[in-house]
Image (cartoon, rainbow, N blue to C red):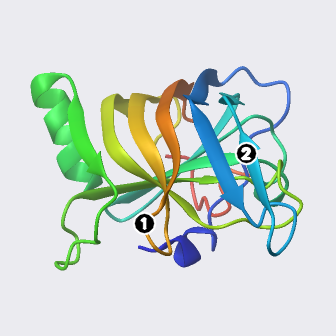
Amino acid sequence: MGWGRLWVGVGLLVLAGCDQGGGLVTGDWLEAPGCDGPGTAARFEPFRMALDTMGAEREGDVLVLRFAPDAAVPFDTDQLVVILEGYAAARAEIAASGSTSWALGGAPALVPGSPQAQAGLALIGRCAYTPTPLSASGTAVFSRLGDRRGQRVVGELRFEVVDERDGTTRGTGFVAEFDFDVEIGQPYRSYSPRDL
């Protein structure tokens, strides 16, 4: 599942004022080519982004997590997005051993449905223009991974930020930690046929 498909059909985040949980993304530095227009670059050193809202939406065996610093609609705020393909296997591993660890990044699996994880940063709030697509290369560890109301998502990512186009390193020393309760329905999800 590529970033192009990611933005289609993933829900709004959360209503303001709801204490859903929290988290934080920090990094040593981040360079965002194209942030202020073609031929420009912005550098954030150190990088810091509070995570105050989370949207969790599952389709089949794929879970998409969207974390943001505020309850704005997805096209108005910075975001950390995590896509897990192989959700059932991840939940089974957490049940058996207390956590599950995934490699982030790399080439997509050739076999549809094979377990894999991707993550990336969208600097929609900080940048006047959509900058280079920024992906995570590292590891993700989850100790809770829910998709139904009242369940939790607890985890940590450790990664470098790379340019999706050519693999150039755009940021180092990144850590994302989060602990959220899952909320459902509008505006938490764009498509929620029933309360799960």
Which quarter of the rendering shows the N terminus?
Answer: bottom left
Q: Nearer the viewer, residue 154 or 28?
A: 28
Residue 179, compared with residue 30, is above or below; it is: above
Residue 168 image point, x, y percent: 47, 62
Q: Nearer the viewer, residue 90 or 117?
A: 117
- Quarter-of-image position of residue 20: top right
- The residue wearing badge 1 is 167
Q: Is residue 151 left or right of residue 62?
A: right
Residue 159, compared with residue 74, is above or below; it is: above
Residue 90 image point, x, y percent: 23, 44
How many marks overall?
Answer: 2
Alpha-carbon span between mark 2 and mark 1: 18 Å
Residue 171 image point, x, y percent: 54, 45
Which residue is depicted at the point 23% across and 51% down? 88
Q: Secondary structure at mark 1?
A: loop
Which residue is depicted at the point 68% across and 61% down? 190
Q: Say whether disc 2 or disc 1 marks the residue closer to the N-terminus.
A: 2
Residue 64 image point, x, y percent: 48, 55
Q: Nearer the viewer, residue 66 or 121?
A: 121
- In this rendering, does residue 89 appear at all? yes
Disc 1 packing (10 Å; few <14; some 14–19; many ≥20):
few
- The residue wearing badge 2 is 43
Q: Secondary structure at mark 2?
A: strand
Q: Nearer the viewer, residue 125 or 97?
A: 125
Q: Residue 150 has which mark? A: none
Q: Amino acid at mark 2?
A: Arg
Disc 2 packing (10 Å; few <14; some 14–19; many ≥20):
some
Q: Amino acid at mark 1?
A: Gly
Specify the farthest residue to the left.
Answer: 96
Residue 175, compared with residue 64, is above or below; it is: above
- In this rendering, does residue 146 appear at all? no
Which residue is depicted at the point 29% across and 63% down? 106
